[in-house]
Amino acid sequence: MSSPRQIVASLEDTDRGIRLDLVGRLGKVRRRKDQKGYFLDFRPYGRVYSNRGIALDSRRAAERLLAQIQGQVGDGAGLVSVLAHFLPVESKPNLVPQRLAQWLEVRRREEASGTLSPRTLEVLESYCRPAGHFSFFASLSIFEIRYATLEDFSLWLADRSQSPKSRRNILSAFRGFLSWLKRRGEIREVPSIPLPRAEEYEPRILSIEDQDRVLAAIPDDERGIFLGLGRLGLRPGEARALAVTDYRDGWLTVDKAFKGKFVASPIRGTKTGKPKRLPVGEELGDWIEKHVDPAARLTQSFLFVNPRTGGPWTHRALENVWRKAIAQADVPYVPLYEGTKHTFATDAIRRGVPERLLQRFLGHADVHSTRRYARLADNALVAVLRPEEARLSRPSHRPGTSQGQGLHRNFRGNTSEYWWAPRDSNPGPSA
């Protein structure tokens, strides 16, 4: 006769009819040693002595429960998950660490398939380590988690010197775990999560004139990727992953990103999982014509190559070049992401670009992510009071281009068959 392990293993990838036949061999009704009732023997997966607290005082009651469990397994539920509802609350299969291990395995498979960021998996694994933040639940059952439990957890994190923002992130991750349990039918509901109030980070940004000065301070052969960041609002991981084949007829297709800061980091889909197609401004288009060999299309080469290494850019290399350019331009230091993408988006909002258009351009899944750029930093607030005509009348610091920026720049509206063909005298419609 097949063992319970063999039966459970054979249930995978079988149709319902075969499953129902197989599960009929799972579990045995046995008499308790004290002769005061019965229990269901599913060893090595466990023994069930009651039906949610009601003792199995007759063989008939035990057989009904056995049939109920077999039916749920036959419908596709996992035996371990089904038994957890009938085992004592404090039994090992019901403890949070056991379920976290199962959850992490699912997350690892998602990361391997490309649907989860490696960085996200790394953070979740750190939370689940024996001394990690989720160790608070080491001796608790999934059925013992209530609002009060989570409130105590939040305060425990505060005692660990975690900031309100970090506590929100950790609690949100645990909510993801609880939501997974609910979707699997392991728990009935997800308790309310006491997310602490955290001050929303106010990004530092550059004025568009200062951004021009910083870009002008970057050596010409290195400037291309920074034009993509500052003029198109690309994320660094997206710009680093662009291939020569992603550029054609004055348009860029952005459908992937580096999922990490290093050359060896995997390249997967964009943050939202959705591709976007962006018009390339004259300035970046000229740079591509000058520095990118059209033959590189045949080798799937990167569009932006670090001239110092001949390979793709790392995040640290980008930050080093940006930091030097900031110092050379003699402007207050603003980090790379904020001085490019945030500055681009804030200036677009200031100029009245519709938020839905900007949302599509930036690749935001939620318009609320776009709306945060409406909360301008102090230097942008000053720019709001400055007439547009006055600003445009000032001498341009932009290297090698005429005035105009952001979504209002003319893009390369080529109709030529080849992407590297000379640009028409008519720059085409604006974006």
Image: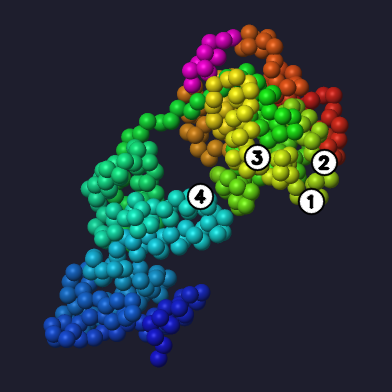
Q: Is residue 276 visible?
A: no
What residue would you read off at disc 2?
293
What residue would you read off at disc 1?
299
Residue for point 65% across, 22% down: 212
Residue farthest along the bottom direction in this orientation: 1
Mark 4 → mark 1, Cα distance in angstroms: 29 Å
Left or right of 48 in this view: 23? right
Label 2 secondary element:
loop
Instruction: Work out whether mark 3 precedes mark 4 in sequence or the reverse, and give the earlier one.
Output: 4
Crowding around mark 4 (Cα neighbors within 10 Å: few <14, some 14 to 19, many 20+) is: few
Mark 3 → mark 4, Cα distance in angstroms: 18 Å
What residue would you read off at disc 4?
119
Label 1 secondary element:
helix
Q: How is the image coloured?
A: rainbow
- The spot of residue 118 in percent (x, y) is 53, 52
What residue would you read off at disc 3?
239
Which region shows up in magenta? Answer: 377-387
Left or right of 60 in this view: 368? right
Mark 2 → mark 3, Cα distance in angstroms: 18 Å
Residue for point 26% across, 80% down: 40
